[in-house]
Amino acid sequence: MKLFLCEKPSQGNDIAKVLGATKRSEGCLSTPDGQLIVTWGIGHLVEQFNPEQYDPAFKKWAFETLPIIPSQWGLSPKKETKKQYNVVMKLIKQAQLVVIATDIDREGETIARELLDLGKFRGQIKRLWLSALDDASIRKALGALKNNEDTLPLYYAGLARSRADWLIGMNFSRLFTLLAQQKGYQGKPLSVGRVQSPTLSLVVNRDREIKNFIPKQHFTLQVILSEGTQPFATQYVIPEQYCDADGLCLSAQVIQAANQQICQIGQAKVESVETKREKQSAPLLFALSDLQSEANRLYGLGAQQVLDIAQSLYETHKATTYPRTDCGYLPESQLAEAPRVIQCLIQSDSRLQPLASKLNLNQKSRAWNDKKITAHHGIIPTMVKADISKMSEDEFRLYDLIRRRYLAQFLPVSETDKTQIVLKCGQHVLAARGNVLIAPGWKILFGKTLDEEDESKQALPTLTQGQTCRVVDTEMKTQQTTPPNHFTEGTLLTAMKNAARFVTDERLKQRLRETEGLGTEATRAGTIQGLIDKGFLKKKGKSLLATEEAITLIDNLPQTLKDPGLTALWEQALNQIAERSLSLDVFMQKQEIFVRHLMDDCIKKGISMGNIEIRKCPKCGSPMAKRKGKNGDFWGCSAYPNCQHIENIGAKKASRKGKKAPNKSVNEQISELRNLLSE
């Protein structure tokens, strides 16, 4: 029997329809002769053991049980999907050939292969590599099945990710919760994660930067000139000796003196005129993070919302390709499919018909590049006549963003004349910039929704070197520097994707690929939502703000667990496993050494509770801790037996602020992680 193992029921139904597997049974579909069966998971059907499944002693959170490092890793069925797990395992035991048909990433690979390993499957394995779920794409993929070995390393990378996350999450969440409880903290467990902690650190650091920001007052001078009939604005170029390190003039007297002299002279002479024709290509196709950021900017949609909508466009509507991609490029072979894709777009929405005559389907934009393709290509419309009437408002919004990016590939480049004029008024230099859009090209698709730099769009008069212009008006401006903006879900996603930019250690920067980020396209939205659900982040309008619990946790975590650049090194190691340049065993050996070493260091350092309110003993001032007694829970002094003060649960809390313990040097911690993960 041949078994197709899919990731979810909707995926299974689409593939089964093409295969002719129309006979429905419990948790599967089969051909009439029963020789071909399609079944599915509901995402992961199994999960990592909880600590107590390895040893009942681990059920109690205690220092003496840490660190918890399994010698043999175990998986157990999820309770909520146990029924489907039993169906799949029974079918695996009956199959001679299994075709893995899950999503084409390391998590999809892991979902299928962990079941095959549990079922001790020893038959033949093939891989269905699908980027879209329309009939044509499924048939094409069925004709080009990959061999087992082609994608097996993705599974090892998935196991490494899962096990590394378990080691960090289980051990350090317990450790820091226990350390906090020693100081009297009785809130919910302090959650630590390989990806979530550095992501949270980004927000904490940004909030702190904004809070501590001191505005700097500075001064500028705008001068309005005219060559006759057309006035235009210029800026006084402040000499370097009057500027600070940021290029700002902090002295009003300097500007006042320049203003007075310019007004007295009354004219300026053109020193140079330079006009450049700038050609701007259409943006690449959407990767998931880019789509999430754009949808957040334009429509205020959350990262998880966008992922769910994109998944619906892919699975339910069959209108777009696989969404969990980190790539904005397309295979060159797909250029031949463009006429059919565009025909379907116009059939789906007649409002696009006037655009058809403007499209050059023979044009090969920079987006078509085989050398830039990763495991997946950019998100594009499929060769399906989508029924846009069945889409929700948000579904159509995302679909529209995706199709516009695709259509833009077949429109001309955008052309803008950028002019810079330098003039002199006595010894004072004035500069003017102006942009004139010559040919909008692909920009006709986007209107005012483009996120363009705030550049001068004034139309400058035609001037020549040596020409004189009259001073019409001047304006001194008192300005203040502004702090950076709070993160939104969109800008936080971008920061997560570009975590390598946060690396300051030069040796590490050389080893870290610029493309490495925090987590993957498939997991970033869940990480942000998880931080919100756990109470570490709160929303204020579009902004994300860190809570007091978040600030205290980040202030106490060692640098290696919260540094975005260092955590990107983990992601690089996982990608190296997928690329066969690092083994799972070596990676896990390094993880174990790292966890043991770092845990010892954290225990020696202890924890400071910052601004989190805790209870202190009214007799001796030591922290109070919640304890279990024969008659229930009670508050007991942590200085016991020297102080034996106790209180019934419900006693009034008192606040106490602790001092932050010094961090281990960042360079030492960077060296440790680099040595462990990048040797």
Image (cartoon, grey):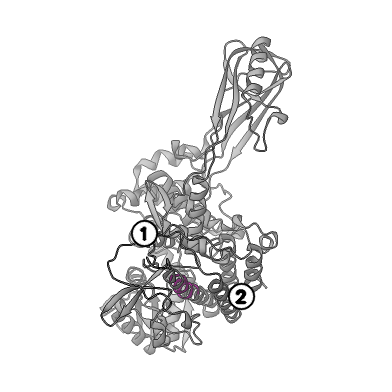
- Rounded to the nearest angstrom, the CA distance separating label 1 from label 2 is 32 Å
Quarter of the image for the C terminus: give it: bottom right
The secondary element bearing badge 2 is classed as loop
Q: Which residue is mark 2?
A: 580
Query: Amino acid type of disc 2?
Result: Arg
Crowding at mark 2 (Cα within 10 Å: few <14, some 14-19, many 20+): some
Query: Amino acid type of disc 1?
Result: Asp
Q: Which residues are magenta?
A: 168-177
Quarter of the image for the N terminus: give it: bottom left
Residue sitting nearer the eye, 419 or 139: 419
Question: Sequence-wise, which precedes: disc 1 or disc 2?
Answer: 1
Q: Is residue 375 visible?
A: yes
Determine whether 444 is above or below 625 in the image.
Answer: above
Left or right: where 486 falls relative to 591: left
Residue sitting nearer the eye, 38 or 428: 428
The residue lying at 39 percent from left, 41 percent from top is 353
> Looking at the picture, how far across and down is residue 125, in whole percent?
48, 82
